[in-house]
Image: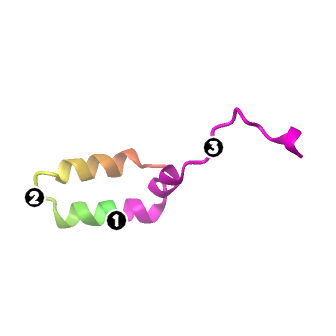
Amino acid sequence: MVARLDFAKPKPSVLGDWLRREATRDRLHRAWERDHDSPWADDLAQAYDLLRV
């Protein structure tokens, strides 16, 4: 069994998995809608766009 493992293959990232969840993108979008007039609104929009799957 150990011979079948690919140790060179990148391991899954818990943070990456969380970031790619649809629920995470939805929360970013709702935060942008709520805070669209705030100085950080562009940051929320950019984060949302970057997480497009």
Up the image or down, 31 lies above or below 6; here it is: below
Q: In the rendered image, which quarter is residue 11 located in?
A: top right
Q: Determine contact: label 2, label 1, CB under 8 Å.
A: no
Looking at numbered disc 2 in the image, what kind of residue is underneath it?
Answer: Asp
Among numbered discs 2 and 3, the one appearing first in the sequence: 3
Q: Position of residue 48 (x, y in %)?
A: 34, 52
28 vs 41, left or right, is: right
Q: Residues within 10 Å of mark 2 (few under 14, many from 20)?
A: few
Q: Determine contact: label 1, label 3, CB under 8 Å.
A: no
- Total label count? 3
Secondary element type, mark 1: helix
Looking at numbered disc 1 in the image, what kind of residue is underneath it?
Answer: Arg
Residue at 37%, 64% in the rendered image: 26
Q: Which residues are magenta?
A: 1-26
Mark in the foreground, 2 or 3: 3
Q: Position of residue 43 (x, y in %)?
A: 23, 48
Looking at numbered disc 3 in the image, what kind of residue is underneath it?
Answer: Lys
Q: Which mark is residue 12?
A: none
Is residue 6 located in the magenta-colored stretch of the structure?
yes
Residue hosting label 1: 27
Q: Determine contact: label 2, label 3, CB under 8 Å.
A: no
Among numbered discs 1 and 3, the one appearing first in the sequence: 3
Among numbered discs 2 and 1, the one appearing first in the sequence: 1
Mark in the foreground, 1 or 3: 3
Residue at 28%, 46% in the rendered image: 46
Residue at 34%, 65% in the rendered image: 27
Residue hosting label 2: 37
Is residue 21 located in the magenta-colored stretch of the structure?
yes
Secondary element type, mark 3: loop
Q: CA–CA distance between discs 2 and 1?
A: 17 Å
Residue hosting label 3: 11
